[in-house]
Amino acid sequence: MAISNMMRGEDEGGYETEGDPNSEAYWTERGMKRPQVVWERLTASNNIETYRTRVPGGWLVLICQEYRDTGGALFYPDPAHRWDGTGFHG
């Protein structure tokens, strides 16, 4: 199905919601709960907000500037999750 048709809600029969991890039926059918992403706010300066969440193999870090529509995300490799959330000031 073309993306434009999906956005309009025109189903050609080729899209199955049972295999869609965004639907509740996907998780219920497998006897599982939808995973929760827990963001931890880190201290930052200069009106920059920084958050992190634990993911396999490290951390997903989200950085955004307060009062602006700018920001980004990065992966910080740390398989043992030893990073305490502070910056390196050495």
Image: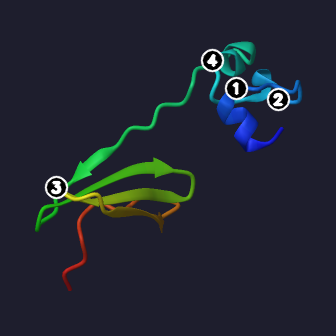
Q: Check if mark 3's residue and mark 1's residue have beta carbons within 8 Å.
A: no
Report helix, strand or loop for mark 3: loop
Asked if 34 appears above or below 77 in the picture, the reply is: above
The residue carrying mark 4 is 24
- Say few, some or many: other residues with alpha carbon within 10 Å of mark 4 (under 14 / 14 to 19 / 20 or more): some
Pinpoint residue 79: horizontal percent, then vertical percent.
53, 61
| Residue at the limit of the structure toward the bottom, as seen here | 90
- Say few, some or many: other residues with alpha carbon within 10 Å of mark 2 (under 14 / 14 to 19 / 20 or more): few
Choose mark 2 or mark 4, whichever is in front.
Answer: 2
Report helix, strand or loop for mark 1: loop
For marks 2 and 1, give the CA distance: 11 Å
At horizontal 11% and vertical 68% (from top left) the residue drawn is 46
For marks 4 and 3, give the CA distance: 34 Å
Pinpoint residue 16: horizontal percent, then vertical percent.
82, 25
The residue carrying mark 1 is 9
Choose mark 4 or mark 3, whichever is in front.
Answer: 3
At horizontal 74% and vertical 14% (from top left) the residue drawn is 29
Q: Check if mark 2's residue and mark 4's residue have beta carbons within 8 Å.
A: no
Report helix, strand or loop for mark 2: loop
Residue 81 shows in this picture:
no
Judging from the image, the colouring scheme is rainbow
Query: Of the residues shown, which amino acid type is indicated by label 1?
Result: Gly
The residue carrying mark 2 is 15
